[in-house]
């Protein structure tokens, strides 16, 4: 059956290491094309999602800090929603009500609904939306974006509102941190099982491309100075997951590094849509060749964030940057002019800074970071 619809299910704060321990995600893996090394642009929601929707780094789009969604350069960059809306799709999003503004770019949406994450059963809410989406779309093709806040809500209430980035009480209690996250991830499993079941029940599973992805991970206390996310550029927040579900795609795992900015051009390519040349060039690259089993040169993954350090106010501009390959990662901390280099193959927890022993690698990645930052300015 020819695909028509796009359904994106965004798991806010989903850690990839928990997917391998999960029956729900293991079952999903067998039914999808699974990107197991998908690197986000920003380890927090607003900038990471804007990068997904535009295929472009936030330094170019204007969305490169926690409260910069209002700065989105919509005249320069066309969103995924706008591409689909231009092809006569009905477009709807259901997202958390965030005081800082919308967490997604609004351009192209026929409807954006928001919900109070503290007082809403998000699973029931999204099941009801799926039940009515075909009627709502009036028989048209549709793009449905669902934001699952199960993890975010728990972290907000139990960590962000209780501790600070350097709270000793948080970092001294690893057992409780792990227990907390396990409980929240279990809620995501229940949510996902129910949502996918309802999609099948409504008869829209086979004629839809479904993307289940996370925007960033969450700290369990791995590095003092980051009690949740958004302060550092380590893999527990940067390395995300993505499951592309489609009758037209193979069912296998791709271990090669990919980037969340690659999602937009990949989806357009899958739907045989062309990039609009009236807008500025994007940073992402279509992964369709990789999906087909062909070789693709691995692209450098660039990430950045604003580390507040001990300040109460979040920084207005990024001050922590990283470039990553499947094997190496270089982190530059602008606030104190320090660098970190990690051998990701042999040091997955990024505990051993090999900057002094791998000077040539550091030099190469330093040049890559310089090129990316110069291009983005």
Image (cartoon, rainbow, N blue to C red):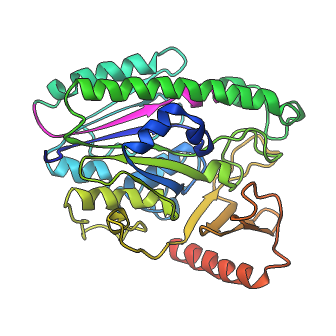
| Side (left or right) of 158 relative to 205 | right
Q: How many labels does the image show?
A: 0
Residue situated in front as seen by the camera: 99 or 293: 293
Q: Where is residue 208 in the image (x, y as percent from the top left)?
A: 23, 41
Query: Which residue does the image show at 83% across and 45% down from the upper left?
Result: 224
- Where, by quadrant of the figure, is residue 29 drawn? top left
In the image, the segment drawn in magenta is: 139-155
Residue situated in front as seen by the camera: 270 or 334: 270
For residue 315, say whether it is visible: yes
User: Considering the image in quadrants, where does the C terminus appear?
Assistant: bottom right
Q: Position of residue 124 (x, y in %)?
A: 39, 16
The correct choice, above or below, for 154 with respect to 218 in the image is above
Query: Which residue does the image show at 50% across and 28% down from the upper left?
Result: 189
Q: Position of residue 24 (x, y in %)?
A: 48, 32
User: Considering the image in quadrants, where does the N terminus appear?
Assistant: top left
- Where, by quadrant of the figure, is residue 183 drawn? top right
Query: Which residue does the image show at 25% across and 35% down from the upper left?
Result: 205
Query: Which residue does the image show at 70% across and 31% down from the upper left?
Result: 160
| Magenta highlight on residue 150 | yes
Residue at the farthest left position: 139
| Side (left or right) of 160 relative to 22 | right
| Magenta highlight on residue 43 | no
């Amino acid at each position: 059956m020819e695909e028509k619809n796009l359904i994106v299910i965004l798991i806010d704060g989903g850690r990839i290491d928990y997917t391998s321990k999960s029956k729900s995600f293991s079952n999903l893996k067998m039914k999808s094309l699974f990107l197991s090394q998908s690197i986000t642009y920003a380890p927090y929601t607003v900038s990471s999602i804007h990068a997904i929707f535009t295929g472009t780094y936030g330094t170019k789009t204007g969305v490169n800090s926690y409260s910069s969604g209002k700065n989105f350069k919509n005249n320069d960059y066309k969103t995924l929603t706008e591409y689909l809306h231009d092809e006569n799709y009905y477009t709807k999003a259901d997202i958390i009500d965030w005081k800082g503004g919308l967490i997604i770019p609004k351009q192209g949406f026929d409807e954006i609904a928001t919900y109070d994450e503290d007082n809403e059963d998000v699973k029931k809410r999204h099941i009801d939306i799926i039940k009515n989406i075909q009627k709502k779309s009036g028989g048209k093709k549709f793009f449905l974006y669902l934001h699952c806040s199960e993890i975010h809500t728990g972290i907000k209430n139990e960590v962000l509102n209780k501790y600070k980035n350097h709270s000793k009480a948080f970092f001294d209690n690893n057992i409780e941190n792990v227990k907390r996250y396990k409980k929240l991830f279990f809620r995501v499993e229940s949510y996902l099982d129910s949502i996918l079941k309802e999609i099948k029940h409504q008869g829209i599973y086979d004629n839809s491309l479904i993307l289940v992805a996370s925007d960033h991970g969450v700290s369990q206390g791995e590095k003092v100075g980051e009690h949740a996310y958004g302060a550092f550029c380590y893999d527990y927040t940067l390395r995300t997951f993505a499951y592309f579900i489609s009758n037209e795609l193979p069912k296998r795992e791709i271990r090669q590094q990919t980037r969340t900015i690659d999602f937009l051009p990949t989806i357009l390519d899958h739907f045989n849509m062309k990039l609009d040349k009236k807008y500025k060039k994007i940073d992402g690259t279509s992964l369709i060749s990789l999906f087909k089993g062909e070789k693709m040169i691995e692209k450098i993954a660039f990430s950045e964030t604003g580390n507040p350090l001990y300040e109460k106010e979040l920084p207005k501009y990024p001050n922590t940057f990283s470039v990553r390959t499947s094997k190496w990662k270089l982190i530059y901390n602008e606030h104190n002019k320090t660098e970190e280099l990690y051998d990701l193959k042999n040091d997955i927890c990024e505990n051993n800074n090999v900057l002094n022993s791998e000077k040539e690698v550091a030099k190469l990645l330093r040049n890559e970071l310089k090129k990316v930052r110069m291009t983005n300015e």
